[in-house]
Image (cartoon, helix red, strand yellow):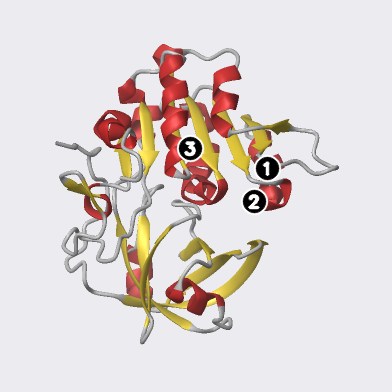
Amino acid sequence: MITAMPKTAIAKENPWHSFTARLERVRQEIASVATYWLRIDDQAIAKEYRFLPGQFNMLYLPGCGEVAISLSGSAESNEQQLVHTIRVVGRVTEAIARLPVGSTIGVRGPFGSSWPIDVCQGKDVVIVTGGLGMAPLRPMIYWIMNHRSDFGRVVLLYGARSPDLVLYTDELDSWRAHEIEIQQTVDRADDAWSGAVGVVPLLLDRLPGLRPDSTEVVTCGPEIMMHYAALSARKRGIPKQSIWLSMERNMQCAVGLCGHCQLGSTFVCRDGPVFRYDALEPFLRIRDF
C-alpha cells in the first residue's frame, strides 16, 4: 500500500465549486510553454485563497474541459494572482494558449499535497529537476528565498534537452544572489553552451560536499529522470525518507473519484502529487506503469 505525505492543502467546503479568474498577462517562456497570470474576480475569494508550494489548480474552459496545472508563482505574494506555467499538449492547453488577455478562466483549487518545507527547515536541500518540472518547484525556491536563514545549503540541479529549453533564465541570477547554488546540464549542447552535457542525475552523482544525514532531495520532471535521480540520491547515502517526488499523471477530477490518476492503491490528485520516495519506489521500478 502506498502512503503519501500528509496533505497540507487548504480544505475547501465544496471541491467541485469553481470561481472565475481573469487573464492579466502572458509571457512566452520557451517554444510551446508560457506563463499565465490570473487574477481572481471575486475579491472575497481572492483574500481567502492560499496555496502551498507543490499544489495545483484545475483550470476550466466551457465547452473545452479542465486540466490540472501546478501553481508556479509565489505562495506568499500579496498580489493575489494565480501564476501557472503551461505547456501546450492537448485540447484544453491549446485553447488556453489562444486566449487573449482579459479572458475569463474557471478555477478549482488549490488541491494536493505540497513540498515538505517544514521537513527541509534546518537542513540542506538539493532540488533536482528537468524540463517543465521546474515550474512546480519554483514556488519552493521562492519560499526558500523568502526564508533563506531557515535552510542550510541549497543546490538546484537543472537539466533541459537543449539550452533554448531552459525555463526562467531571467531569474537565475536572483536565485544565485540568495545563495542558491545552480548547476545546469543539457542533453544536446549548441556552440554557445559551456556547461555540462548529460542527464541530470549525473550532477547529483558528482555533487561535492553532500551531507547525506542532513539533506532533503526534492525532484520533479519526467518519471524516468526522477527514478534515476532517486537512485543517485540513494547511492550518495540519502535515506529513502528524505527523497520527495512530484508525480504528473492524468488528473481529471482532483478529488480521487474518476480513477484516471490511480497509482497502486492511491490517487495522485488526492494523495499527491508530492510523495515520499519510499511510497513510490516499488512502482518506479515497473516499466511503463
Element marked by disc 3: helix
Count of numbered labels shown in the rendering: 3
The image quadrant that residue 130 belongs to is top right
Kind of residue at badge 2 = Tyr
Query: Does 28 sit left or right of 84 as displayed?
Result: right
- Using the image as rendered, state which of residue 225 and residue 286 is in the foreground: 286
Q: Report which residue position mark 1 lands on.
A: 172
Q: Report which residue position mark 2 lands on.
A: 168
Q: Report which residue position mark 3 lands on.
A: 225
Tell me which residue sits at (19%, 58%) in the image.
256
Outermost residue toward the bottom? 63
| Inter-mark Cα distance, 3 to 2 | 20 Å
| Inter-mark Cα distance, 3 to 1 | 22 Å
Whether residue 3 appears in this view of the structure is yes
- Residue 238, horizontal then vertical, whole percent: 40, 18
Nearer the observer, disc 3 or disc 2? 3
- Using the image as rendered, state which of residue 88 and residue 109 is in the foreground: 88
- Using the image as rendered, state which of residue 229 and residue 36 is in the foreground: 229
Whether residue 123 appears in this view of the structure is no
- Residue 131, horizontal then vertical, whole percent: 56, 48
Query: Does 164 sit left or right of 242 as displayed?
Result: right
